[in-house]
């Protein structure tokens, strides 16, 4: 019988994703080198030469933002920030195609 006190049956406190190939450590992600925003898309270029675009509809905050707010972004190697609308999108979500759905 398994019990919580049995050391061999305890689970690790860290939860793993169902697909281990999606457990990507940040140091293995490419760095952003350029970002542009249009009326329909956010386009990202990475230091390794890849380009990836995603629709504004991935983010309710971007869809509902004014053009001026959409253009007021900053980015670093791993994230794009829109301070005016409190939105942050990370490289991992961009590359894995994760739609953002929080309000």
Image (spheres, rainbow, N blue to C red):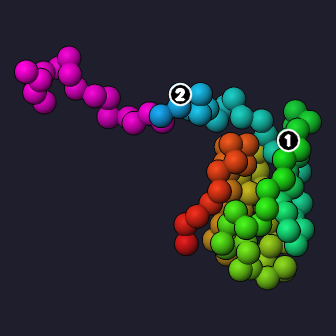
Q: Determine crowd level at label 2: few under 14, some 14-19, many 20+ residues with C-alpha closer than 10 A.
A: few
Give the structural element (helix, strand or loop) at label 1.
Answer: strand
Where, by quadrant of the figure, is residue 77 drawn?
top right
Q: Which x, y percent locates residue 67?
A: 84, 79
Give the magenta range.
1-17
In this picture, residue 2 sits left or right of residue 101: left
**Does 68 appear above or below 20?**
below
Magenta stretch: includes residue 16? yes
Magenta stretch: includes residue 11? yes
Specify the label residue 20 is tagged with: 2
Q: Residue at x 53, y 28 (%)?
A: 20
Q: Determine crowd level at label 1: few under 14, some 14-19, many 20+ residues with C-alpha closer than 10 A.
A: some
Q: Residue at x 73, y 72 (%)?
A: 62
In this picture, residue 24 sits left or right of residue 15: right
Q: Earlier in the sequence, mark 2 or mark 1?
A: 2
In this picture, residue 59 sits left or right of residue 11: right
Q: Which x, y percent locates residue 56?
A: 77, 66
Tags 2 and 1 in contact by the CB under 8 Å rule? no
Q: Residue at x 74, y 57 (%)?
A: 80
Give the structural element (helix, strand or loop) at label 2.
Answer: helix
Specify the label residue 46 is tagged with: 1
In this rendered view, identify the residue nearer to me: 20 or 65: 20
In this rendered view, identify the residue nearer to me: 52 or 28: 52
In this rendered view, identify the residue nearer to me: 74 or 19: 19
Q: Residue at x 13, y 30 (%)?
A: 4
Q: Which x, y percent locates residue 26?
A: 64, 35
Q: Is residue 33 visible?
A: no
Where, by quadrant of the figure, is residue 55 drawn?
bottom right
From the image, which quarter does the N terminus lie in? top left
The single residue placed furthest to the top in the displayed view is: 8
Q: Which x, y percent locates residue 53?
A: 84, 53
């Amino acid at each position: 019988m398994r019990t919580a006190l049995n050391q061999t049956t305890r689970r690790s406190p860290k939860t793993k994703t169902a697909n281990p190939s999606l457990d990507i450590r940040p140091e293995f992600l490419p760095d952003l080198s350029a970002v542009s925003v249009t009326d329909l898309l956010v386009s990202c270029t990475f230091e390794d030469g890849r380009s990836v675009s995603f629709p504004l509809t991935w983010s309710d905050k971007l869809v509902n933002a004014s053009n001026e707010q959409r253009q007021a972004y900053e980015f670093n190697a791993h994230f794009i920030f829109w301070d005016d609308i409190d939105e942050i999108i990370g490289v991992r979500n961009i590359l894995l195609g994760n739609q953002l759905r929080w309000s």
